[in-house]
Amino acid sequence: MELTVRMTESAMVARTAAAGSMVLLKNVRNTLPFQAGEAGPIAIAVFGVGQIRTALTAGIEPWRAVNILDGLLASDQVTPDGLLSHKYRSALVNGMAPGAELSPEELDVGAAAGRAEAAVVVVTRPHDGYDYHLRPQEFRLIEAVARAFPKTVLVLNTPGYMDIAEASPLVSAIVYMGIAGQEGGSALADLLTGKAVFSGKLADTWPVSPDQFDKAGLQTDLYTGYRYYDSFGKDVLYPFGYGLSYGKPLMTAYSVGLDGGIVSVEATIENAGKTWPVREVLQVYFSAPDDQVSRPVYLLDSFAKTGVLQPGESETLRLAFPVSELARYDPLSATWRLDAGYYDIRIGTHCRNTTIAGSLYVPKPIVTVEARSCIERPDESVRSRKGAKPFSYPGEAEERAASRKHAIRVSARQVPAKQVRYSKKFPGCRGGKPGIRLSDVYEGRYDMRQLVASMDEHDLRALVCNFGSSQAKVPGAWGASADLWDRYGIPQLTICKGCDGIRLTRDLRNEDGDVVGHQYATAFPVPSLLACSFDRELIHSVGSAVGREMREFGVDMWLSPSATVHRDPRSDCYHGAFSEDPVVSGLCAAWLIQGCQQHAMAALRHVESAVEVTVTERTLREFELQGFEVAVTLGRPKALLAPSIAVCGEALSLDNRILSDVLYDEWEYDGMAFAAGELFSRFPSRPMLEQAALRTLRTILDAPAFRKTVR
């Protein structure tokens, strides 16, 4: 196989992204990194079928896939035990069943300990419907290896959370590898040997027991993830935003200010270590008054990641956001408002390692946005925190008291209210005549409305309602838009799925079954791992690499990413979404979109895990839609795939208030919307079709497929 420049560059992006996203959860007794000594590379024993059957992709067939064993074999710092790897290869060749594991007796763990200085135990789960419990044979293996090796690294090659509370004390290091893409084995080897340093942070809370997912999910409201565990004082194994490094990052100074309605946060991060470089993530949370309504004890507002800090180096990070982002939605008045009281600004490196850096004081309620309701109010309400004891830390009360003594006063003049202007009923298009083509609109001879007015209703429905349902010309693509070239000069758009890259048919065959060509796409880390990078530039680079491959293969639109939030890792779509926090989900989606749309187009989507959802409007707006709002307003995707779900009994369609009012009027979205099923909940009128057609055609004007026709 001959490597192209694009294939090599994309592989480098995938490797860097995987290394920048994996999370070091534990590291004691100087277990990591593995470093070669005077005698040469360190001998290590690698256990677990996952070292060879490494879960690396979510359905994409990449042009290569580097498993964990091959990644370690390529390192000059370690030498994996050959006898052990031979036993695993032999077992797999002889038809070892999926999910099975060799026993400590078959592997002769004691003898392996005599040949190696350290051990790595790999636990693997596929991306779809994974079981987050350790199997009995896996726990037995971890227990036996940890007993024989003082230095044992547990590698979790899984989509997310694993129930390791019982296994965690046994091992000396734990690495969350995730589903890391085609270069995952190489990236893991880079981190284990110190060629790269850990900088990933958990984008989800890991509870002590998986039973806590059921308790957190008793009600679909504002309390999920850290918002639940920290608000109700539940013990966790690893908190949201947690992750270790080889260096020693310290926050040495910080400040909070307010200028014209913009909150500014500044903090200096220093690498106080003596050997290893570090990268740290500064996370900004806020606590709001909860005497009026039930609220989580604190919420993430923003974050930023330092560059690489060598020992002794420091960097000052500056974050700014409108004070209106601290507002909550009042369903009774259909307004966003800042309640009267104190807003404490917390900064730190994870949700349970923060400091109250300053406070804002709102003397009287301030309305920030005047909107209108988008759903009927259901009976369910947000759970109350009354009587619950939230997570706290020594000295928090003193910090709060000192901060509020010098609280910054917020006045209504600094936060002028915005009144949403909702669109009037679309009157329809006029002035059409036969023979108008899309190129005429592009070149300014006719207006887009004239083209739409000239289309018959059958073609309008094909363009709008059947978008994506036509056969794609690119093998393996998800679908295409209607081919209306002959009548209107409207080309087909090719649409491709894949949360970790573009999913295409890798090997192209003729009628006789002979391979006649290839479509070598790259598999990148899945979103549930990529979010752990907390890194705008890294995620942007992945999106850009995907967009570049789309252009090469003739794909116009990528049906990804999603801004859906995680509620339960048992969801089949868990790996395809970023985080339990809507801010992280929205920002990651926006950065991926921005990168992709340098070369092609992206369609923001909802990862469907339910047929119907019943929520209060407050929960819908403050939690379920928040990530999508961030992704839409910051990422500006060219398209949005309407999910095939019902919210409070009403289908989410173009004639639904959530899409018509919130998406287009409140968020001022200017792209198109389409659906895998029905785009309208009732038979659409001609003006409704024409309005949707205008948005669709504006998108097609920007598509590579159309640009090729007007060169």
Image: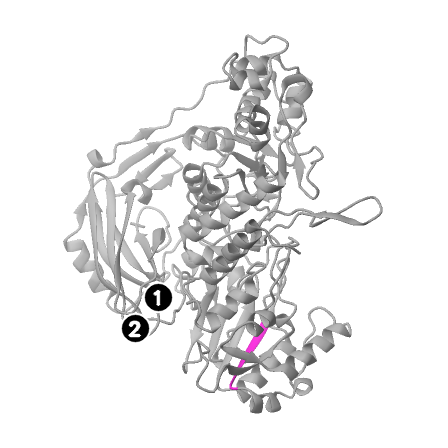
Three-letter amino acid code at disc 1? Val
Position of residue 550 relative to residue 572, above or below, is above
For disc 1, the neighbor class at 10 Å (few under 14, some 14 to 19, many from 20) is many
Label 1, on which residue? 278
Disc tally is 2
The quarter holding residue 64 reads bottom right
Position of residue 329 relative to residue 92, above or below, is above
Q: Does residue 471 appear left or right of residue 349 in this picture?
A: right
Q: Which of marks 1 and 2 is nearer the N terminus?
A: 2
Residue pictured at 57% horizontal, 92% vertical: 114
Image quarter hosting the N terminus: bottom right
- Magenta segment, which residues? 117-123
Taking depth in this image into account, of 218 and 22 the one nearest to the observer is 22
Taking depth in this image into account, of 450 and 386 the one nearest to the observer is 450
Query: Residue 178: where, in percent of width, then height?
Result: 54, 63
Q: Does residue 323 appear left or right of residue 1 in this picture?
A: left
Membership of 243 in magenta stretch? no
Query: Residue 24: where, in percent of width, then height?
Result: 44, 69
Query: Residue 532: where, in percent of width, then height?
Result: 45, 58
Query: Residue 342: where, in percent of width, then height?
Result: 23, 50
Taking depth in this image into account, of 497 and 409 the one nearest to the observer is 497
Asked whether the beta carbons under mark 1 and mark 2 sit within 8 Å of each other, the answer is yes
Taking depth in this image into account, of 114 and 174 the one nearest to the observer is 114
Residue pictured at 53% horizontal, 38% vertical: 600
Image quarter hosting the C terminus: top right
Label 2, on which residue? 273
- What's the coloring here? one colour
Three-letter amino acid code at disc 2? Gly
For disc 2, the neighbor class at 10 Å (few under 14, some 14 to 19, many from 20) is some
The quarter holding residue 120 reads bottom right
